[in-house]
Amino acid sequence: MVSRSFLKAGHTPTLLSAFLYFDLSFMVWVLLGPLGVAIAKDLGLDPAQKGLMVALPVLSGALLRLVAGVAVDHIGPKTTGAIGQLLVIAGLALAWFLGVHDYAHVLVLGVLLGVAGASFAVALPLASRWYPPEHQGLALGIAGAGNSGTALAALFAPGLAQVFGWNAVIGLAALPLSVAFVIYMVFAKDAPNRPPPKRLAEYLDVLKAADAWWLMCLYGVTFGGFVGLSSSLTIYFNSEYGLSAVTAGFFTSACVFAGSFVRPVGGALADRLGGVRTLSVVYVLAAFGLALASFHQSSPWIALAVIMFAMMALGAGNGAVFQLAPQRFGKEIGVVTGLVGMTGGIGGFYLASSLGWAKQATGSYQIGLLAFAGLALLALAGLTGVKARWRKTWPSEAQRLGATLRL
């Protein structure tokens, strides 16, 4: 999958630095999910409060991605990423020092963790600008596989919380982030083909293009499903199947690793077969997996297999969307990444919060999962309707960018 031409085409230290920065930032972004069982027990939270607790960092990160995307195009991805990392490290250290004592404090912490979630709008442009169009899917798939950091949180946070307490885990999370920051500052470099800065208002001109809105909606389903489930699964397995927080965290990490490491595969398939074709298959598989997951399975192991299947489909879809984005918006990839990433986060906020609401209102997560399966089918219908126009109009855009079109 990683060819010799790919290794020669870009800048591997930057790609790997972007991956590590993204990976550990995502670990922190969803930290409240794996800690949710312990936090809810100590603070006496109901299902709706738990849903909002894990969904708020996702929403905060979604909105901040737009800010980060504009900053990437204005001051450069490396500088933007450095500022974001310092804010998160300082915020985690302060939260640990002062303590998180009630639900309001948890929500404030959730807003802060959104800064880590905004790393998406930095890491992907940082990597993307080093690679030619024929390698965009794989390059962004590798950088984007950093969303596996959500699995690290699920894998380690519940166990550490049992030993040290969940408040201490918040402070401990700053340590690996500090290591990643040093590596990032030493090895990451801005690509030499960075476009010149524009007025801030000009960056939002892409919203006048219908294609930007389509990409935003498509990613709102694939990444929204991925991150919404990543944030909620520890609580889900604990609530639905009576698993301990640690075991539920292991199950969650398995699902997240499966979805994360299929993302480069999705990007590579999109490079070879076309992003539209790949996405069309992805939405069918994701809808099927989510619908099947909405029914209570006879054992947690069957539930694990079903949700892993859905997460793999969603992960492949994430890679496919970002094979398409640079072909249409290569010169505006920073702000487009921010906008597309923002809607992905909003989709995750919707799923995580709706799962909590569904559990509170009906005693089951089924309505929330079925509704998101319906959104996947709606995205498929939209993609089917727009693909003919893309195949007629995007060749002119590719010619404008000097790119090779792969739809």
Image (cartoon, helix red, strand yellow):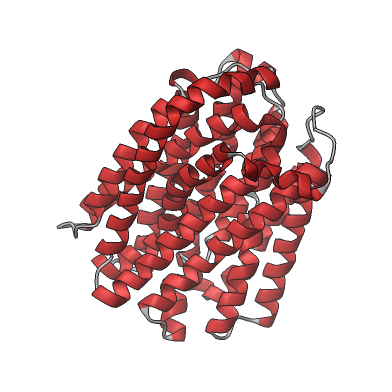
Outermost residue on the left side: it is 298
Rendered location of residue 40, percent (x, y):
43, 79
Q: Is residue 407 in view from this perspective?
A: no
Side of 39 relative to 332 (left or right) = left
Relative to 375, say whether 160 is above or below: below
Q: Quadrant of residue 366?
A: bottom left
Rendered location of residue 287, percent (x, y):
30, 45
Q: Nearer the viewer, residue 387 or 20?
A: 387
Relative to 285, say whether 305 is above or below: below
The tally of labels here is 0
Rendered location of residue 24, percent (x, y):
61, 51
Q: Nearer the viewer, residue 342 or 311?
A: 342
Give me the residue at 38% from left, 49% from top: 255
Rendered location of residue 304, percent (x, y):
28, 51
Give me the residue at 52% from left, 40% from top: 215
Outermost residue on the top side: it is 5
Q: Is residue 194 in view from this perspective?
A: yes
Give me the residue at 69% from left, 22% from top: 401
Q: Nearer the viewer, residue 404 or 92?
A: 404
Q: Quadrant of residue 131?
A: top right
